[in-house]
Amino acid sequence: MTKNIKVNAAILIIGNEILSGRTKDTNTSTIALWLNSVGVNVKEVRIVPDIKEDIINSVNLLRKKNDYVFTTGGIGPTHDDITAESISEAFGVKYEIHKEAFKILESYYKPGEFNEGRQKMVWMPSNAKLILNPTSGAPGFSVENVFCLPGVPSILKSMLGGLKNAIAGGKPIISYTISLRTVESEIANSLTEVQNNNKDVDIGSYPFFQAGKLGVSIVIRSEDQAKIDTCNSQILEFVNHKNIEIVERT
Amino acid sequence: MTKNIKVNAAILIIGNEILSGRTKDTNTSTIALWLNSVGVNVKEVRIVPDIKEDIINSVNLLRKKNDYVFTTGGIGPTHDDITAESISEAFGVKYEIHKEAFKILESYYKPGEFNEGRQKMVWMPSNAKLILNPTSGAPGFSVENVFCLPGVPSILKSMLGGLKNAIAGGKPIISYTISLRTVESEIANSLTEVQNNNKDVDIGSYPFFQAGKLGVSIVIRSEDQAKIDTCNSQILEFVNHKNIEIVERT
């Protein structure tokens, strides 16, 4: 979350497997990094179960509060894949066979292999636009500002590039990290001062353990490289003054 | 998310580092697996930025909708650590020095090292109960049904065990996974039938890629081992009938 960024998105992770703890969500990070690169800030993430009412309520709330909503999961062929049906209800439109998606999958599979199970994946909200899938054929889709992607991380990743023209973001959000050999309490006051002097820049402080040693990463985020540079030099000032070792700058 | 489980929790992840994509959240999985083991189901997760209003609104909504709320992050000594202050406001109580926490940290640090930065970590909601931290001293805290834990995964993990007596859960939630060498569309109809025959059991289907091979994991979840066994034998029936290879059962 970055201050003063004008274009915002929410991510809605649909999936019992994340809520049960069985699977760790990596899609949030993938989508957020990509969105930042096209000038969109992620303001909020929600993880909900495979329950239609929960999906509908979340989508309808998030799509009004944000410029974009990205959902992940629930667009496969099994009984627990209910995203397309839920999005149709959320927008009050028909849930029906998408002709273009049907053609894509019909030619993707060998003759006779486009069975009933697979055909479920071409049922979509009636006005859906397709999001092409270079990895495994079955497309995702968007309705207005809601973009529905699959849950499998490698497939999701391969589909994001194709969305670039569908998103009207701002300037790319730049992130700069200074990792220090110190503990947070040693730098807390100085860092607060830098944050107070640069109120429209996002400055985060994150302790880490690496190879048995403690450290703190300071992360500066902004659309404006000059503002990042200003914060950076103010941070380096107290770092040098306190004689703190710099582990890494990225 | 498991059907018919009576005790439910929400998780609130507080942290810009997750929303920016810089850090992948693993705390949801850690907390969810632990909660399942003490008979509590995770119904919903939200990830919000380090913004007081967002934290207050989310906590006040989630604590009314759920038996328990677990927050992670924002309880360290730096300017972006605003969880304790936000929770105080959410409950309308004073944000003040917690005497017991002060004593713990005063004796944890060497004489003279319990500086102003570190003292920030003993400011808490006035009626907070401490959650002891066996890893790094600084305690978490709870107010009513809201439990506030740190964001650093290894520290969070070390603190959960101490919470067991504070949580009144149901029967532990059991999870059983059958991994198959198949694709979802081959088993979708048969699996739907098993789900329809066992409506109060949670059956999920998750495609995977492992060592270059496709597969599907079927996950069965319930409080009741007998119900899991029934589903399992119904699944094995169609798996054997279709001559599908079983990769793993856990």
Image: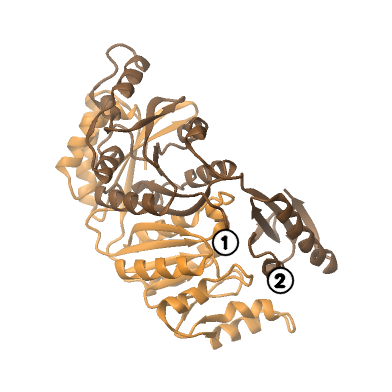
Chain colours: A orange, B brown
Identify the secondary structure beneath mark 2. Answer: helix
Q: Which amino acid does label 2 sit on?
A: Glu
Query: Dot 2 falls on which chain?
Result: B
Q: Which residue lies furthest to the bottom in this view?
A: A99
- Residue B129 visible somewhere in the drawing: yes
In this rendering, position of residue A159 left or right of residue A109? left
- Residue holding disc 2: B193
- Residue at 45% over, 78% down: A89
On residue A187, the disc is none
**Vertical placement of residue A18 versus B100, above or below:** below
Q: In which quarter of the image is residue B72?
A: top left
In this rendering, position of residue B99 left or right of residue B158? left
Query: Dot 1 falls on which chain?
Result: A
- Residue B160 visible somewhere in the drawing: no
Identify the secondary structure beneath mark 1. Answer: loop
Question: Picture coordinates of residue B18 (x, y %)?
Answer: 40, 49
On residue A152, the disc is 1
